[in-house]
Amino acid sequence: MNNLLYLESYCFGKIFCIVKNKKIIFLYSTFVLLFILLLSETSFAQCGKERWDVKTLTDKDTTKIDFENIIQTTVSEQCSLKRPQKVKNMPRMKSETTVYEIVAYIIEYKKESDRDFHVVIEDPETEETMVVEILDPECPDIDNTSRYGIFKEVRDWFKEYFHPTSSFKTTKKKVKLTGVGFFDYLHGQRGMAPNGREIHPVLSIGFVI
């Protein structure tokens, strides 16, 4: 018994502990670390990749965007824009240097695997739809930008009122939002405009009473 140390406390999850030379080696430490990484919303591996710098306004051509000149538009107008011949791996295009203001209905939304909130909006007149994306400000590069506070405010507002999960939810709420025009890949996203036009990222959002 002289070489044994009696433990009256519990190991996390009752995982086996080795007692040697009166030092406790907790085997659960590795499991705890993996568990935290899996649950952490700030796990870097989960954030997006495709044209990520353009989507997050961290590309060098963001300086070409006039954030003070906000253009009023509609979902229908954005759906009618001509799609560029090439989108994949392209730097920011001229058609992606404008900040727009849109009034529309939010009709569906979910949290995607890349941590964006995928939000489908509908034109009040034509019922055409397009996608707008709300960034996670805690993703790498975004958390160090001057627009971190803007992204966090939008994200927090949306979480407070809509509580998105990994499954689509439906609603019918009228909002006014602003954000930068963007052309995404055509890969069958739910609610996507036929030309792949999106607002990505959203810069402000609020209910229309």
Image (cartoon, helix red, strand yellow):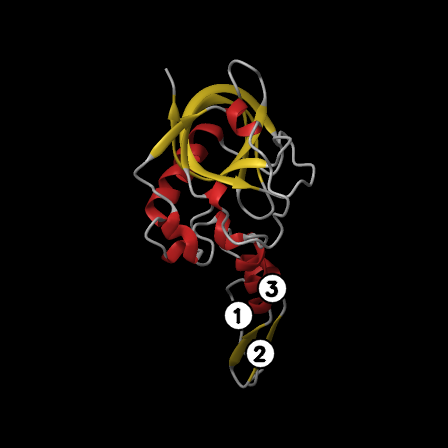
Where in the figure is residue 191, as x and y percent of width and height? Answer: 62, 29
Q: How packed is label 3: few (under 14 Cα within 10 Å), some, or many (20 or more)?
A: few
Check residue 63 in the rendering and tell me which mark sits there, or answer none.
none
Where in the figure is residue 184, as x and y percent of width and height? Answer: 59, 42
Q: Residue at x 47, y 46 (%)?
A: 136
User: Which residue is the site of mark 3?
Assistant: 31
Do residues under tags 2 and 1 come within 8 Å of each other at their CB atoms? yes
Work out whether 116 lies above or below 129.
below
Q: Residue at x 48, y 19 (%)?
A: 173
Where in the figure is residue 69, as x and y percent of width and height? Answer: 32, 36
Residue 40 at least partly seen: no
Give the spatial CA distance, label 3 vs label 2: 19 Å
Which is in the foreground here, disc 3 or disc 1? 3
Pick the residue in front: 28 or 11: 28
Kind of residue at badge 1: Leu
Residue sitting at the far left = 68
Mark closer to the chain start, 2 or 1: 1
